Structure formats: structure tokens, C-alpha cells
């Protein structure tokens, strides 16, 4: 069997740990004339071009100079069936769900629609430099089948699951407690661990699940300890009040998920904005991960995520687009809005921590930094190639950049898919090569 060897040349940047401040230059490896040797989808070597080239043999050389090579971006919360919901006007969370989101998700009962949307969705992710995502699919198993099938075809490391939702949703968009359990179980058997796929058990949120369904979700979590669990938590004040009215015996919102055994270090909790002290203690105790969705939180007027407060308690936060309440597929634009959400609270997001967050940081949130999120030898060859001068505005600004951190900050604030020159998933270029 012929093996495919590729040598990517460019300026390489990979984080070795989380930077402890804007001047923590020991936290990363940056090589001015760097190279990655890729074989069979895996990074075989990362180092200076001169040295790596010696091991490269007949490898095909792709010269990306003067661009930056970084690990592919990781998006830890978004909704695949909301590709046609993004930019829907005028509402906050609960009305937005009822007016726009639920009708759009209902269409994913049709496998042809789901397959067409999956192709478009994956094209969008890779165009924006995202190589791993954790997605909610619709309630229909065929939506998850379309999602996972597309990921398998592209050999991408993707996580997802069909949402479980058995109340407070329209006809055509509800399962039952038993059906949600059975369908999830069958999808785990079909896809979890296949290729680069992992399954996320996905009760949508407490409002759309009966106690019986959350109990079934808890059983699935107990039976499949290597799957993820994803849901939503304390995004919006009306949502919290409604949740507590549906679960009157719960001490607080997170107490609902606690009661049904959903919390562990593999639990991903979208939003987590309006938290009580007991809930924060519970996050610390269980290792469950809040996921910050800045463009979504601003778009829906949900509130400001207290990144520093949670981090101060030793909690590891993910960061994500939350398409379709989020307004950009770009993790760069997500960092831009994150910077502003933190500014409004007197908190700071420096460019080193920002780029760590959307690569190794999110990989750590998933417990996957031994596979993705760095350019380390032995990890999977998911790579994004970035141009900090991609637009006229960026080009003008980049000319006065003296440091790597300044260049990264230009990408963080002004970058989007135009700054993504190429995206490699398991070593395979995802954008047309010009
Ligand atoms: N809460 C429950 N479902 C959703 C959703 O689809 N988007 C957002 N932003 N919040 C939710
Ligand atoms: Zn969401």
C-alpha cells in the first residue's frame, strides 16, 4: 500500500500549555521556518524545516510561507440543523427557538435534506479553519446519520448526537423517553468509535425533556462512560424560571442535571451564564465543562459569561460558536466577540490565551489533547493555515505588527474565513488548491 507523505512548510505555532499571561512566551513553540511532516493522516515530525526535511524522503512539499500553520480550530458547541437559522431576527432564546429554530429542525426528518445540509455544514466548518466540532443534530436519527456519514467521508474528528426532546416542542420534533433512549443507543452502536467519531448523548435542555427522559439520558451516560454528554444550562433568565417551574423540587437548574446523573468531566454545558454559588461548586466537584458562546450570547441578549470567575474556581471553560444563535462559523470571530464580552466585565483575553483556547484548550476540555489541538508528533494532522494580511484592513494593520502576539491579535479581532488559506483534516486539504 502506498503511503502519502506531505511536508508542509511555514511559520508553525503550537501551544505546550495554557499561557499564564500576555508575556508567557514559554507556553508555546513557534518556529519561523518550520515544517510538519505528515504521513497517513498523522504528524510524524514538527520542527525546523531544515531538520524535518531530512526525514521527509519523497514527501510532497507544500510551501505555505509566509503564512502561519496552527492546529485546526475546535468548536465545542453548535447545532448542525441550524445552518438555515443563523441570522434570524428579533427574539430572545425561548421565542427564537419556537419561531425559527424548531420549524427549521423539523425538516431534518428528510434524509436527503439532512445529507445536503451536512455537506454544506462541513464545507463551512473547514472553510473557517474548524477541524473538530461538537454538534447537536435534530431529534431525528437520520440527521445524526447524515452528520456522522459526512464526517466519516472526510475522515474528520467529530463529535455529535441526536437531541433527545420529548416535550415543549412541536409535532414532528419530539421523541419519547423510550424512543430517545433506543435511538441514541443505536446511534452509539453505529458510530461511536468508528473512524474519528465520538458520540455525545444530547438531552437538549431540561425544558424539552420530561423527568423520564432525563432519567433515560442518565442511564445512557452510565452505560456509555466514554461518550460525551452535552446540553444547555442557564443561558437566559426566562429559561431558568421556566425550568424551575417544571422541576419544582430541584435546588437550582444544574441540580436537575445532577439529579439524573448527567454530570462528569465529559459533560459539556452550553452557556452557563447565570449561575448560583451552589451550581459553581457543583461544576468544580464534577468537572463538568461550561462552554462560552459569545456571539450567541450577544445575539440573543442572553448575558455575559463570567470567564474569570469560573476559571478562578479551577473550572475549565470551552469556547464555541453556537451556530445558529451564534452569528459566525469562525472561531476567530468568536474570539473577537469573546474579547468584548470580557472587556464589558473588566476581564482580559490576550491573544496567546485566545489561540490556546480554540486549539489545545478546547482539546483539553474534550480530554483529547493527546490526539488533536497541537502540532505535536504523533497527533492527528488537523492543521489550519492563516494569513494575517488577508484583507485590506488586516494588511494595513499587520504592517505595524512587530511581534507574534500582535499578529495573533489582528487575526483574533479582524480574521474570519478570508484569513484561512487552507485547512487540512487528517492531512487532506479541504479547500480548493489555487
Ligand atoms: N437551548 C436549547 N436549545 C437551544 C438552541 O438550539 N440554541 C441555544 N442557543 N440555546 C438552546
Ligand atoms: Zn446550543
Image: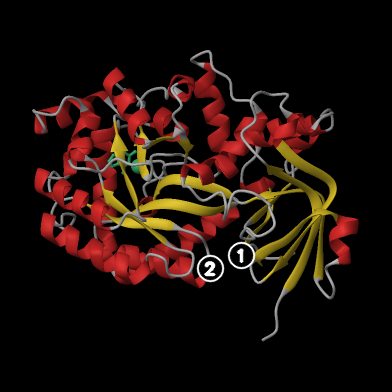
Mark 1, Cα crowd under 10 Å, few <14 / some 14-19 / many 20+, is many
The label shown at residue 158 is none
Q: Earlier in the sequence, mark 1 or mark 2?
A: 2
Using the image, determine if residue 222 lies above or below residue 253: below
Residue 153 in view: yes
User: Where does label 1 land, which residue?
Assistant: 426
404, above or below 427, in the image: above
Dot 1 falls on a residue whose secondary structure is loop
In the picture provided, is 68 more to the left or to the right than 206? right
Identify which residue, 429 or 396, lies in the foreground.
Answer: 429
Which residue in the structure is indicated by mark 2? 155
Front residue of this view, candidates 50 and 64:
50
Asked if the beta carbon under badge 2 is closer than 8 A to the nearest atom of ligand 2, the reply is no
Farthest residue to the bottom: give it. Answer: 1
- Mark 2 crowd level (few <14, some 14–19, many ≥20, 10 Å Cα): some
Q: Nearer the viewer, residue 40 or 97?
A: 40
Examine the image and state in which quarter residue 105 appears. bottom left
69 or 84, nearer to the observer: 69
Q: Quarter containing ligand 2?
A: top left
Residue drawn at x 53%, y 36% as measured from the top left: 334
Residue 413 in view (yes/no): no
Q: Secondary structure at mark 2?
A: loop
Say which quarter of the image contains residue 358: top right
Residue 282: horizontal and vertical position, in percent? Answer: 30, 28
Q: Are marks 1 and 2 in contact (CB under 8 Å)?
A: yes
Q: Quadrant of the C terminus?
A: bottom right
How many marks are shown on the rendered structure? 2
Amino acid at each position: 500500500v502506498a503511503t502519502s507523505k506531505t511536508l508542509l512548510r511555514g511559520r508553525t505555532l503550537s501551544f505546550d500549555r495554557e499561557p499564564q499571561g500576555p508575556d508567557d512566551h514559554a507556553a508555546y513553540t513557534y518556529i519561523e521556518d518550520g515544517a510538519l511532516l505528515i504521513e497517513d493522516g498523522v504528524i510524524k515530525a514538527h520542527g525546523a524545516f531544515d531538520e524535518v526535511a531530512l526525514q521527509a524522503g519523497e514527501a510532497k512539499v507544500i510551501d505555505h510561507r509566509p503564512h502561519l500553520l496552527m492546529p485546526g480550530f475546535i468548536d465545542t458547541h453548535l447545532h448542525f440543523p441550524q445552518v438555515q437559522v443563523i441570522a434570524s431576527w428579533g427574539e430572545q432564546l425561548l421565542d427564537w427557538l419556537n419561531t425559527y429554530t424548531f420549524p427549521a429542525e423539523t425538516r431534518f426528518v428528510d434524509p436527503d435534506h439532512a445529507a445536503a445540509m451536512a455537506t454544506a455544514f462541513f464545507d463551512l466548518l473547514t472553510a473557517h479553519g474548524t477541524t473538530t466540532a461538537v454538534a447537536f443534530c435534530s431529534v431525528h436519527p437520520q440527521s445524526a446519520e447524515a452528520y456522522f456519514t459526512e464526517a466519516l467521508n472526510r475522515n474528520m474528528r467529530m463529535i455529535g448526537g441526536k437531541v433527545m426532546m420529548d416535550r415543549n416542542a412541536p409535532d414532528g420534533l419530539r421523541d419519547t423517553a423510550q424512543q430517545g433512549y433506543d435511538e441514541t443507543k443505536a446511534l452509539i452502536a453505529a458510530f461511536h468509535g468508528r473512524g474519528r467519531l465520538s458520540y455525545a448523548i444530547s438531552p437538549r435542555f431540561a425544558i424539552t425533556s420530561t423527568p423520564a427522559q432525563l432519567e433515560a439520558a442518565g442511564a445512557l451516560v452510565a452505560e456509555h462512560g466514554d461518550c460525551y454528554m452535552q446540553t444547555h444550562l442557564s443561558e437566559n433568565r426566562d429559561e431558568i424560571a421556566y425550568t424551575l417551574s417544571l422541576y419544582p423540587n430541584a435546588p437550582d437548574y444544574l441540580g436537575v442535571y445532577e439529579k439524573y446523573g448527567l454530570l462528569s468531566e465529559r459533560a459539556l454545558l452550553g452557556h452557563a451564564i447565570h449561575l448560583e454559588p451552589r451550581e459553581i461548586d457543583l461544576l468544580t466537584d464534577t468537572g463538568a465543562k461550561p462552554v462560552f458562546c459569545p456571539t450567541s450570547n450577544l445575539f440573543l441578549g442572553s448575558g455575559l459569561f463570567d470567564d474569570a470567575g469560573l476559571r478562578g474556581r479551577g473550572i475549565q471553560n470551552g469556547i464555541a460558536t453556537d451556530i445558529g444563535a451564534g452569528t459566525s462559523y469562525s472561531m476567530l470571530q468568536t474570539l473577537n466577540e469573546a474579547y468584548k464580552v470580557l472587556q464589558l466585565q473588566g476581564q482580559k483575553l490576550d491573544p496567546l490565551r485566545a489561540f490556546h483556547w480554540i486549539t489545545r484548550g478546547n482539546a483539553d476540555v474534550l480530554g483529547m489533547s493527546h490526539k488533536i489541538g497541537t502540532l505535536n508528533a504523533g497527533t492527528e494532522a488537523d492543521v489550519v493555515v492563516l494569513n494575517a494580511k488577508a484583507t485590506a484592513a488586516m494588511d494595513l494593520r499587520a504592517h505595524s505588527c512587530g511581534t507574534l502576539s500582535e499578529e495573533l491579535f489582528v487575526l483574533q479581532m479582524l480574521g474570519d474565513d478570508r484569513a484561512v488559506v487552507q485547512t487540512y483534516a487528517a492531512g487532506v486539504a479541504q479547500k480548493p488548491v489555487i
